[in-house]
């Protein structure tokens, strides 16, 4: 549980990965050694990260590739477990991260909407009530009974965004999803996120788009050298990040 009044509470957060493969350590490794020292072939993707997020805040996470931005998002989503410290989240999350994951190629669009929405916690009645809106937003009215594997990549992204953005969870996690799709659909995504923020949702947003970060976020977290280098208003964080990037710092 988070402290009273917080949406997200992160304390002394650390997570390790192997250098020689993408996967996490084995189950045996998890129980064998809880030492703070890295073993040969391992590195800390994040270390000693602390911050709080209040309900309704819009947080932008910035940093160069490989500094732990997406890993942090997955830790908040509960997809990954930390090796050190804690992540506490008050309320459910709507994860717009790797959003096409979980869809089944041989199932139709209709079947995938019902399956995926159900996996995210929607009741059958809710899925039925929201189904037409999901399909309309995704602009897939003519493909409802088409197998998912026959959709274009753009169609798959539109469908996934449409499903997840219908979730009534208080915390919205977004990882570069606005970078895909055509311009017209991106504008629809922008408008939908504006609606969610106006409704008081909390936003945790990873992006390389300075324009999007300035549009949606009030506060920024700057990850550098796998640690939290700065926690400040988004404009100040972006100025610091740009200065570090151009000077090679």
Image (spheres, helix red, strand yellow):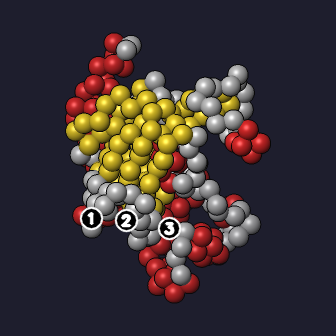
* Residue designated by label 1: 200
Q: Measured from the top left, where is residue 220 in percent x and y?
A: 30, 39
**Separation of residues labelled 2 and 1 (CA atoms):** 8 Å
Quarter of the rendering occupied by the N terminus: bottom left
SS at badge 1: loop
Mark 2 and mark 3: Cα distance apart in space: 16 Å
Asked if marks 2 and 3 touch (Cβ < 8 Å), the reply is no
Tell me the quadrant of the picture where the C terminus can be found: top left
Quadrant assignment, res 54: bottom left
Secondary structure at numbered mark 3: helix
Q: Are marks 2 and 1 in contact (CB under 8 Å)?
A: yes
Query: x and y percent of residue 47 in the render?
Result: 49, 32
Image depth: mark 1 or mark 3 in front: 1
With 209 as the anchor, is 135 left or right in this view? right
Q: In terms of sequence position, does the residue under pointer 2 or pointer 3 come before the other? A: 3
- Mark 3 = which residue? 163
When asked about the image quadrant of residue 15, the answer is top right
Circle nearer the viewer, 2 or 3: 2
Mark 2 lies on residue: 170
Label 2: which secondary element: loop
Count residues near mark 1 (Cα–Cα under 10 Å), then give few for <14, some for 14-19, many for 20+.
Answer: some
Q: Residue at x 48, y 40 (%)?
A: 13
């Amino acid at each position: 549980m988070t402290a009273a009044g917080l949406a997200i509470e992160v304390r002394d957060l650390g997570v390790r990965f192997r250098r020689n493969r993408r996967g996490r350590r084995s189950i045996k490794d998890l129980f064998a050694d809880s030492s703070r020292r890295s073993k040969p072939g391992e590195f800390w993707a994040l270390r000693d990260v602390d911050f709080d997020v209040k309900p309704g805040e819009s947080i932008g996470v910035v940093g160069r590739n490989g500094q732990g931005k997406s890993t942090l998002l997955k830790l908040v989503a509960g997809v990954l477990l930390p090796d050190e410290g804690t992540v506490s989240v008050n309320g459910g999350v709507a994860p717009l991260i790797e959003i096409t994951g979980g869809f089944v190629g041989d199932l139709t669009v209709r079947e995938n909407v019902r399956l995926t929405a159900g996996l995210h916690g929607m009741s059958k009645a809710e899925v039925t009530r929201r189904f037409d809106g999901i399909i309309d937003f995704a602009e897939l009215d003519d493909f409802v009974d088409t197998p998912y594997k026959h959709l274009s990549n753009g169609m798959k992204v539109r469908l996934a965004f449409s499903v997840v953005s219908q979730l009534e969870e208080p915390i919205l996690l977004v990882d570069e999803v606005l970078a895909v799709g055509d311009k017209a659909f991106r504008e629809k995504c922008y408008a939908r996120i504006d609606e969610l923020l106006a409704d008081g949702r909390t936003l945790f947003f990873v992006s390389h788009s300075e324009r999007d970060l300035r549009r949606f976020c009030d506060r920024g977290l700057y990850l550098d050298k796998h640690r939290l280098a700065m926690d400040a208003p988004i404009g100040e964080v972006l100025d610091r990040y740009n200065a570090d990037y151009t000077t090679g710092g």
